[in-house]
Image (tube, rainbow, N blue to C red):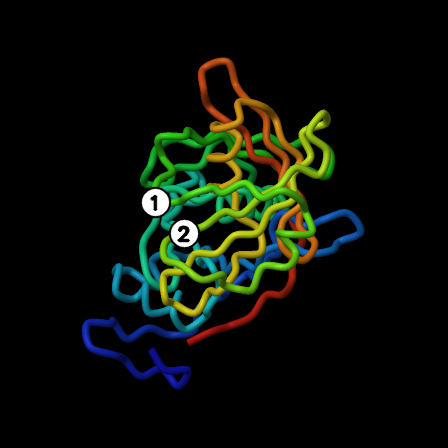
């Protein structure tokens, strides 16, 4: 899809679309955070081809399209795939709707209903381990080993590399490498991978990921896992 309003094969011609760009899972002092594109008017990009083309054009790790703000219906894309669930887009959308005076109690991506909560500066969403697949975690000896990894490290498949910062307190250092060939060499903050690691370890975590991001997790009695983080509005712009 071109910036001048042309079309590619199978893509519907559309006019300008308002895009909110957020940073999700920011660290303290407004550091870090993973960029997210949010298209509030999903009808402006009505087909999967439209949405996939825009996700490629924007180049964020994820772009989310809202099809019904009042019900929290959300459709999530990476530059190469549509996702049934992803943590950082849903935390971002939950924060944005509240910021705009349209808070919701739940979001509805394809995976299912995702409860939403707000606690001070943190926005929380609830997911389930069975919604996350195709990612592998690997434990390293120290945070220094994590920091020294190239982006991406050699190998194939989605890798979540992690090490304990403070085992007793649940502190983790992590980096995420999709390794799927779509231009995202490293994911700055990844809610789905944090959910998976929390499930594997069976405990709440305080994850410091990427260059300066923070993800909090907590376990629910029914096996669900809450993901929490700070969100900041980066910009609002018109796109074609």
Please name the residue shown 64% across and 59% down the image.
Answer: 148
Quadrant containing the C terminus in the rendered view: bottom left
Spatial CA distance of label 2 from label 1 is 7 Å
Q: Quadrant of residue 35 in the image?
A: bottom right
Of residues 87 and 67, the one nearer the viewer is: 87
Q: With respect to residue 233, does 50 lie above or below?
A: below
Q: Where is residue 53 in the image (x, y as percent from the top left)?
A: 33, 69
Q: How many marks?
A: 2
Q: Is 212 on the left-hand or right-hand side of 21?
A: right
Of residues 194 and 60, the one nearer the viewer is: 194
Residue reaching furthest to the top: 221
Please name the residue shown 38% across and 69% down the image.
Answer: 56
Q: Quadrant of residue 163 in the image?
A: top right
Helix, strand or loop at disc 2? Answer: strand
Q: Name the residue under label 1.
A: 134
Numbered badge on residue 158: 2
**Label 1 near label 2: C-beta < 8 Å?**
yes
């Amino acid at each position: 899809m071109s910036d001048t309003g042309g079309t590619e094969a199978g893509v519907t011609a559309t006019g300008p679309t308002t895009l909110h760009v957020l940073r999700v899972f920011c660290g303290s002092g407004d550091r870090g955070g993973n960029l997210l594109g949010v298209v509030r008017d999903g009808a402006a990009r009505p087909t999967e081809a439209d949405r996939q083309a825009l996700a490629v054009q924007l180049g964020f790790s994820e772009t989310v399209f809202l099809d019904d703000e009042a019900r929290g219906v959300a459709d999530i894309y990476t530059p190469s795939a549509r996702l049934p669930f992803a943590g950082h887009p849903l935390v971002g959308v939950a924060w944005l709707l509240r910021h705009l005076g349209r808070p919701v109690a739940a979001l509805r991506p394809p995976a299912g209903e995702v409860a939403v909560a707000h606690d001070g500066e943190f926005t929380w969403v609830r997911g389930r381990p069975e919604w996350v697949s195709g990612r592998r975690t690997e434990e390293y000896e120290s945070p220094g080993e994590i920091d020294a990894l190239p982006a991406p490290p050699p190998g194939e498949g989605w890798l979540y590399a992690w090490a304990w910062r403070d085992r007793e307190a649940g502190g983790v250092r992590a980096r995420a490498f999709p390794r799927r060939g779509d231009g995202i060499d490293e994911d700055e903050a990844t809610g789905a991978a944090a959910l998976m690691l929390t499930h594997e370890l069976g405990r709440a975590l305080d994850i410091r990921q990427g260059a300066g991001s923070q993800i909090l997790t907590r376990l629910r009695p029914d096996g669900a896992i809450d993901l929490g983080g700070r969100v900041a509005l980066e910009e609002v712009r018109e796109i074609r």
